[in-house]
Image (cartoon, grey):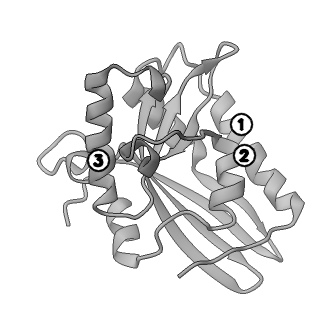
């Protein structure tokens, strides 16, 4: 089922500012490796972005476990899941998105790392129709996470990357992206999910 919410500019701006603050607040010298950076970003993204008469926007992030007996990352192929709970004018929706993150630019990955990424995207695709890849290049001395459609990478097609704040405002807030199946949303929020 497709939904498309059209939020007032003030709410869109609040979300954009929230994401930009989360990104700029991470010191890349302290979190220079991919798992550490992804965990720090997940924590920074968490929170209620807006709550008012028109509704609310809440973001929850889960780091997918890559250690322990259940190895949810091995099953889902993702490093991170993001769940957006959105309410606007008496309409409510809850959607989850699976993301595999990579430090640097995707087009600069070695052939072996690119193959590994495609395998991870395929695993995500086995669970949701719209897997995402987050490339994390450095621009002007700061890491700038960008979102790419996983299907494009699987198909070896040219792709466009979206600044994380633009992606949240244009694809998550509008609820164009994400999976609403309750079992899926609940499963990916469990860091050690094995259901």
Quadrant in the picture for residue 114: top left
Q: Position of residue 32 (x, y in %)?
A: 46, 17
User: Looking at the image, which residue is at 56% across and 63% down?
Assistant: 177
Where's residue 193, x and y in %? 25, 59
What residue does disc 3 label? 77
Cα distance between the residues tagged 1 and 2: 5 Å
Residue found at x 83% / y 77%:
53
What residue does disc 2 label?
A: 18
Q: Is residue 177 left or right of residue 184?
A: right
Corner quadrant of residue 194: bottom left
Residue 132 visible somewhere in the drawing: no
CB-based contact (under 8 Å), mark 1 and mark 3: no
The number of numbered discs placed on residues in the rendered structure image is 3
Q: How far, Cα to Cα, is label 2 from label 3? A: 27 Å
Foreground mark, 1 or 3? 3
The quadrant of the image that shows the C terminus is bottom left
Q: Is residue 75 visible?
A: yes
- Residue 8 at x, y percent in the picture: 87, 66
Residue located beneath label 1 in the image: 21
Label 1 SS: helix
Secondary structure at badge 3 equals: loop
């Amino acid at each position: 089922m497709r939904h498309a919410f059209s939020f007032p500019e003030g709410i869109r701006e609040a979300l954009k500012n929230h994401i930009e603050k989360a990104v700029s607040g991470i010191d890349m010298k302290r979190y220079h490796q991919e798992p550490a950076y992804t965990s720090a970003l997940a924590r920074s993204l968490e929170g209620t972005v807006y709550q008012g008469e028109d509704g609310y926007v809440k973001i929850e992030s889960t780091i997918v476990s890559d250690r322990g007996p259940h190895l949810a990352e091995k099953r889902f192929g993702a490093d991170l899941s993001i769940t957006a709970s959105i309410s606007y004018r008496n309409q409510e929706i809850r959607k989850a998105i699976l993301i595999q993150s990579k430090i640097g630019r995707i087009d600069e990955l070695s052939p072996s790392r690119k193959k590994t990424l495609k395998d991870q995207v395929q695993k995500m695709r086995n669970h949701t129709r719209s897997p995402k890849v987050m490339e994390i290049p450095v621009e002007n001395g700061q890491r700038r996470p960008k979102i790419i459609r996983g299907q494009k990478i699987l198909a070896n097609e040219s792709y466009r990357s979206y600044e994380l704040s633009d992606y949240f405002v244009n694809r998550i807030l509008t609820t164009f992206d994400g999976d609403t199946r309750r079992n899926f949303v609940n499963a990916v929020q469990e860091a050690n999910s094995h259901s």
